[in-house]
Image: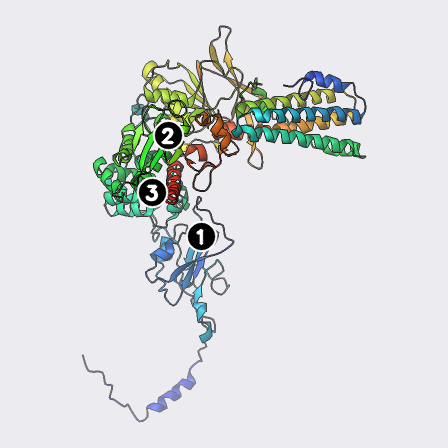
Amino acid sequence: MSEHGEGHSAAYERIRSKKTLGEILEVATSFEKAAFEFYTALIPKVSKNLRYLVEELAGEEQGHYELFTSLAGNPDIESRIQDEIKTPAEDRRFSDFVQLPDLGDHPDDQAILQYALGREDAAMKQYRELADSTEPGPVHDLFEYLAKEETLHKQELEKQYYEIVYSGGPGNG
Amino acid sequence: MPDIPYKDKGSILGPLKTLGFFARRPVTEPFEPRPAADSYRGFHVNDWEKCIGCSTCQKVCDNAAITMVKIPGLPEDPVLGVRNERPAIDYGRCCWCGLCVDICPTGSISLTTEYVHVCRENELDSYFVLPDPNGIHGKHFDKGWDKTADADLVDLHQQPMGEVEPQQRDDNFDEIVHGFTSQQAIIEASRCVQCGMCHESCPTHMNAPEYIRAIWEGNAEEAVRQIYRSNPFSHVCGRVCTRRCETACSIGRRGDPVAIRWLKRYAMDAVSDERIREIAAEGKVDYISGKKIAIIGAGPAGLTAAYDLVKKGHDVTVFEALDKPGGMTRYGIPEYRLPYDRLDADVEVITSLGVTIQYNTRIGRDIGMDVLERDYDAVVVAIGLQQGRSTRIPGSDHKQVRKAVKLLRKITQGKPFKVPRTAVVIGGGNVAMDIARSLARLQKQQYGEVRMTVAALEDFDHFLADPEEVTEAREEGVVILDSRGPKQCLVDENGKLIGLATLGVVSIFDQDGRFAPRYDDSDEQVHQADMVIESIGQMTDVSLFGDELTERLEWNRGRLRVDENGRTSEPWLWSAGDMVFGPDVVHAVADGHRVAAGIEEYLGVKQ
């Protein structure tokens, strides 16, 4: 896992010191950018038949990057966040029992998904912890929102994990 | 008897008798027709919700009064046995015999008590009617001749299939199912209404109506001939086919579907292996094409392609990594479901036609793909899904955590391993049942009792294994738990595997049918075991391609990208079977035919 990026505990200590929504989103956006760059760099390293998976992961991080950037520029950011967190996302916890692998030089599709799940899970938990340790208000709501976004992403990855690993799909070892 | 006095002119006063009518009360007939009897055979009505367009009514009609009409917009699904056709009646031909009602598998069609229809000369087409639930004139009339148990021509009950009792089978690998006797087979075949839904739903479009009819006629050889029109793995499919045909069978709408799989098995078992080889050889060309085909993998897909191609006069060599043919049908299916001698009989038909199988030859290790590309006119990769997936939960890397497909292979090969005293299988599919039931037999042999548990993530409403597999496994002492999410393989301080921890699963899918499990933390169970077997999914090993060819090939979400003929992005390379479509024998057979046809077309062009 890349240092000081999404899912890394040291990175979230950095975000804890930020006081404004803009500053927090700026750091959160930098996590997504780092994740995008990580997956993009991984694409040529995996076998061609698995690249689609890493490309999709990079695309999802890119989507998050754009989402957070757009949010930061939104003058109604506080009400927008409040709307978003009205419906919380449930942590399914399925991947809590999937080990975080060492990707190594030749990861298979399952290892790539395990790794991505681990990142999302760690990010979700870090934002959740930040939200829990913050007084009610716009900053708290922003952490709630970020935790929700990571939870939703984790849920999507769990679905993909089940369909590839549990459903007899061909994949590649 | 006196003659009839037809020349008698009567009395001259006769007309005066008519005056007597003036004293009688007038009689008035109603304008509406008189009500018909309760079981009157009037005009048809058809419940379109029930009707599946099977055309059985059309086939039974001796007057050819029924035409099936395609109705755009109605549901059409061959897999479920639904056609978007409905019967139309020509009342210029109909004799109201009611056979269409008596034979209708779904009970959708009936005759009503309505019986009057008049029209002008230019409206004669109005006697050609597409019955719907509202009747010919949109007026409600009571049902007349309707489906009753006495008149129903459809036999709703399958012939019972005998099986070895659990106590006689739980410590051995003898085949469980007895198969039909000749009499049973004929009675079962007589249940078929020849609607052809089975043919359309079958991936390889087996001529099931034809072979069922041949069985009914007592002609097993003809049945085999019909079977071999589309399936050279019929001993196998007669035993372990996923039988989509029976899902689509129209008789199954109200009763048991026709036992099509068992009928196929009956026909194959009723004819000698030698005669089957002769029948299968019919139609083989009597010349040599001079073309060489390499096929990688001696499973159903590869060998079906080999069967088709050798009959076209090509020189076909199959490369098999293991020492026997059959692929997952041999190394993944226990012998109590599929005796190996029957699998061998299927393969011998194919080799008897001239196909060479080179065993113990792993492409990518013993022979490179570049050699095949250079030395053969076409190459087929049909290597199946031979590797098991792991849950990769904590502890799953312990040496006593095994994968089902590897263990099944070991059992088939007779390789020694320590049979676990107590074991847990993670998974709920047919492979999970296969390994659980195989190990249960070995436990019974060695320890005199079964201590085998299956823990499946899915609940019984979404269970992946066939219901009869679950039933039989339970009969043999296997405990099957649904809705258990694997949490951790437990290892004690000495490094010994002691069991599997699972959490209860409250629900597993969301409203869209996608995976969204919810766990109950308060429902944690520990299943003691000295072996945990993972049986959650399978994958293929594409390392045989090597880095260079892998880069050249086009892929589609992890799978080889193939065209409608199974051809990859490399013009000399085809791919077929489980590695393309997932695990299913009859799909693999269908795919074998598909690539063989594609190669034949390609070779014709190349020539």
Nearer the camera: disc 1 or disc 3: 3
Q: Is residue B520 visible?
A: no
Q: Are marks 2 and 1 on the same chain?
A: yes
Q: In the rendered image of this protein, does residue A103 appear above or below residue B298?
A: above
For marks 1 and 3 on the same chain, the one whose residue lies earlier in the sequence = 1
Q: Tags 2 and 1 in contact by the CB under 8 Å rule?
A: no
At mark 2, the secondary structure is loop
* Residue under label 2: B297
For marks 2 and 3 on the same chain, the one whose residue lies earlier in the sequence = 3
Between the C-alphas of marks 1 and 3, the distance is: 29 Å
Q: Amino acid at mark 3?
A: Ser
Q: Residue furthest bottom?
A: B12
- Chain under disc 1: B
* Residue under label 1: B51
Q: Tags 2 and 3 in contact by the CB under 8 Å rule?
A: no
Tell which of B494 and B279 is nearer to you. Answer: B279
Q: In the rendered image of this protein, does residue A59 appear above or below residue B283?
A: above
Q: Residue furthest left?
A: B1
Q: Amino acid at mark 1?
A: Cys
At mark 3, the secondary structure is loop
In the picture, residue B94 is in which quadrant?
bottom left
Image position of B340 (left or right of B527): left
Between the C-alphas of marks 2 and 1, the distance is: 44 Å
Tag of residue B230: 3
